[in-house]
Amino acid sequence: MSEAEMMPQRIDLSDHPVHSAPPVGAPYVLGRWHKDRVSLRGYLREAQIFVKSRGKTHDPKRFIILGRPRSGTTLLVQLLNQVAGVDCRGEELHYAMCNPSGFLLNMARSRSADVAVYGTKIITYQMFEVQRLRDQHAFLSRLADSGFRFIHMRRNTFDQCLSLSVAQQTQTYHLQKGSAAKTLDIAVEPAIMEAQLRWNLAMLDYEDQLLAPFAPLTLNYSTAFSGTEMHQPSIDRICDWLGHARAPVKAALKRTSARTNITNRAALETLAQDLGMGSALHDG
């Protein structure tokens, strides 16, 4: 097989609907720039890691977790970090940088010698809302050429949109084990849910098309992480995929949905059907 045949097939997503579907509740400066793009924190960290990586030859295995907000990526990072020899970071591209792919490669190189596997997560919108990457396929291709593999974290879009809407409304994104178990009754505004569904359905389709040429390991929150009994076999599967030794894990986070009662869930399900977005109810 020739080198050209081995390269991931390019897919042009420049006109994908996701680019015209504004995220709900996104903090923009002057209506134009995401607040995490105008911060200097990313550039400062990029410079620090560049200096730290100079002369380093460490070459750990590496991977990227890609998913939408509230798809289970935080839980996955927390579980993977309990595996000896794995250093899995959070949103390393949370703030804008000059060379995001170079930064991630430098992060891998600068890990300590006891790190056999380096990973991080990217929330999909960060590629074009924060980093403003003109060619996301080329970005992933550079990472793949540098040894990165990809994990696609999926979740049923309706549940993901509900979770995101409630988190934005309550400003509660994660609960630690042992935190108060009081149930919160909450109604999600139909207009907000409609906007969430449009954006997140487009985002999922975008992810599927973008990642397809790279043969990612695809995980679904409902079948891999929604119950504690699923955590260990799912992490074991990832370790096997990475060629890394398995290790016991235990979640330190509690599902926010366990203490949330969406009082108008049935009406929102009907809304999704009436708007022609019923696929969100079963795409997980």
Image (tube, grey):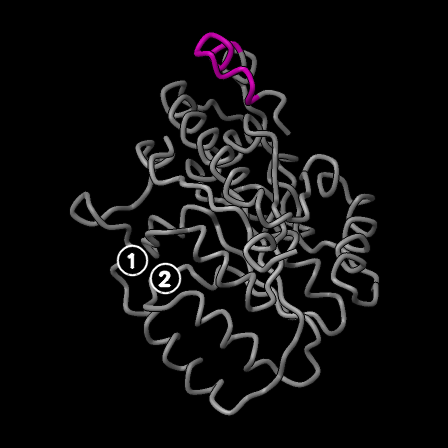
Q: Of the residues shown, which amino acid type is indicated by label 1?
A: Arg
Q: Of the residues shown, which amino acid type is indicated by label 2?
A: Tyr
Local secondary structure at mark 1 = loop
- Residue 68: percent from the left, percent from the top? 51, 42
- Looking at the image, residue 231 sits to the left or right of residue 172; the answer is right
- Residue 97: percent from the left, percent from the top? 34, 66
Sequence-wise, the earlier of marks 2 and 1 is 1
The segment highlighted magenta reads 270-280
Q: Residue furthest front?
A: 2
| Main SS, magenta residues | helix
Q: Quick one: 54 or 68, which is closer to the camera? A: 54
Q: Which mark is residue 95?
A: 2
Please name the residue shown 74% across and 42% down the image. Answer: 224
- Looking at the image, residue 59 sits to the left or right of residue 43; the answer is right
Q: Are marks 2 and 1 in contact (CB under 8 Å)?
A: yes
- Residue 27: percent from the left, percent from the top? 29, 46
- Residue 129: percent from the left, percent from the top? 33, 48
